[in-house]
Amino acid sequence: MPHPLPLAGITVVSLEQAVAAPFATRQLADLGARVIKVERPGGGDFARRYDTTVHGEASYFVWLNRSKESLTLDVKSPEGQEILRELLAGADVFVQNLAPGAADRLGLAASDLQARHPSLITCTVSGYGTTGPWADRKAYDMLVQCQTGLLSLTGTPEESVRVGISVADIAAGMYAYSGILSALFTRATTGRAPAVEVSLFDALAEWMSQPAYYTRYGGTQPPRVGARHATVAPYGVFTAADGKEVLLSVQNEPEWAALCETFLGRPELVADPRFATGSARVAHRQELDAVIAARFAALDGAEATALLDAANIANAGVNTVTDFLTHPVLTERGRWQDVGLPGAAPGVQALLPPAQLSGVDPRMDPVPDVGEHTEKILAELGRAAADVERLREAGVISPRRSGS
């Protein structure tokens, strides 16, 4: 029988939108926290309208919002603020990634909330931090990729390209998640509820540390080398005679010797001064890649992979997203699980959370419709049905959902 979820009994109230904060709170929900997502009356989180590819729902929203409860609330109205204060009085965690200055204007600054609710853990997710010269600037994922220098590292020598996923948002969401877990542990062990603050810029800046060290102390930044590795060689994609693309990676001298002897069939290259060390191989990358490319041109993809495996050289075929969806590491380990969608839409296949806790099954409940749990949550706060209808008429909460 599965053990209780680790965060069962923890209540999270979140004024969240887009990616970073919803990613943090969804992971808390995976572990059993009750996450009450406060959305705008009407459209709700604008990420609901990024696209309509998942049975009419947005792919981002489906990914980030399963297992949550949706409450619509006009938090700028006096009655909406009163309801939010009641929710926070019974909450353990408050998360927000509102526009710069919005939380302060609503009386939701971390210092104000902790003065009123000493046991409440607050988490602020911002673009460039809440202090400093850029505190008031809007920040979206690609803007932060630009500002941290990531785009200058990604792409070909001719062109910078965006990383293909929302890496700044994801980094910030992960640090917000781990920061909240750390704060919950601190509260449990000391009684103190520390405030958590994460910015997209700081999160991605941390991930930029290796190229930052390389640039500061080497004098030049790593070059853009497409599907090669900027500071390790050979490490990149090669094309076999049948058109199959295979990436290989050599990380140390024994692997380099094995590649020369077993795959290339040229043991004399092991001690060749152009290639004898990691730094030399990077300096002579073009010559080295030409030797490896010629060998690939004489083999089909299966033959090349078999020889690389025999040499114990790390390698992988270059998959498409379609290939990834049916990857045996996912399918044969049961990593896909059904998750429900709003209304009558068919469910979706969602990946189980990466961190597996022995004896614990993560929660994989449906993605909520906008305002789906409004009546339930207001009833828990003591609002009678007539009060709820009055709030609807006043626009404090959304109109009644069709079919409800």
Image (cartoon, rainbow, N blue to C red):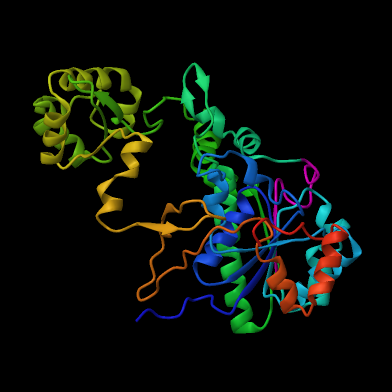
Q: Is residue 130 magenta?
A: yes
| Left-right relation of 50 to 228 | right
In the displayed structure, would residue 205 be above or below residue 4?
A: above
x 41%, y 63%: residue? 355
Residue 379, image x and y in percent? 73, 76
Q: Quadrant of the C terminus?
A: bottom right
Q: Nearer the viewer, residue 8 or 392?
A: 392
Residue 401, image x and y in percent? 69, 57
In the displayed structure, would residue 208 be above or below residue 120?
A: above
Q: Residue furthest front?
A: 403
x 84%, y 68%: residue? 112
| Left-right relation of 350 to 72 | left
Q: Nearer the viewer, residue 256 or 170?
A: 170
| Left-right relation of 64 to 132 | left
Q: Is residue 125 magenta?
A: yes
| Left-right relation of 247 to 192 | left
In the displayed structure, would residue 403 be above or below residue 283?
A: below
Q: Quadrant of the N terminus?
A: bottom left
Residue 259, image x and y in percent? 16, 33
Q: Is the stretch drawn in magenta largely helix, strand or loop?
A: loop
In the displayed structure, would residue 237 be above or below residue 89?
A: above
x 46%, y 64%: residue? 364
Task: Answer whether residue 284 is visible to the viewer in this image.
Answer: no
Task: Answer whether residue 178 is visible to the viewer in this image.
Answer: yes
What's drawn in magenta, residue-wise?
121-137
Quadrant assignment, res 250 = top left
Quadrant assignment, res 303 = top left
x 56%, y 40%: residue? 52
Residue 73, image x and y in percent? 78, 60
Q: Nearer the viewer, residue 134 or 268?
A: 134
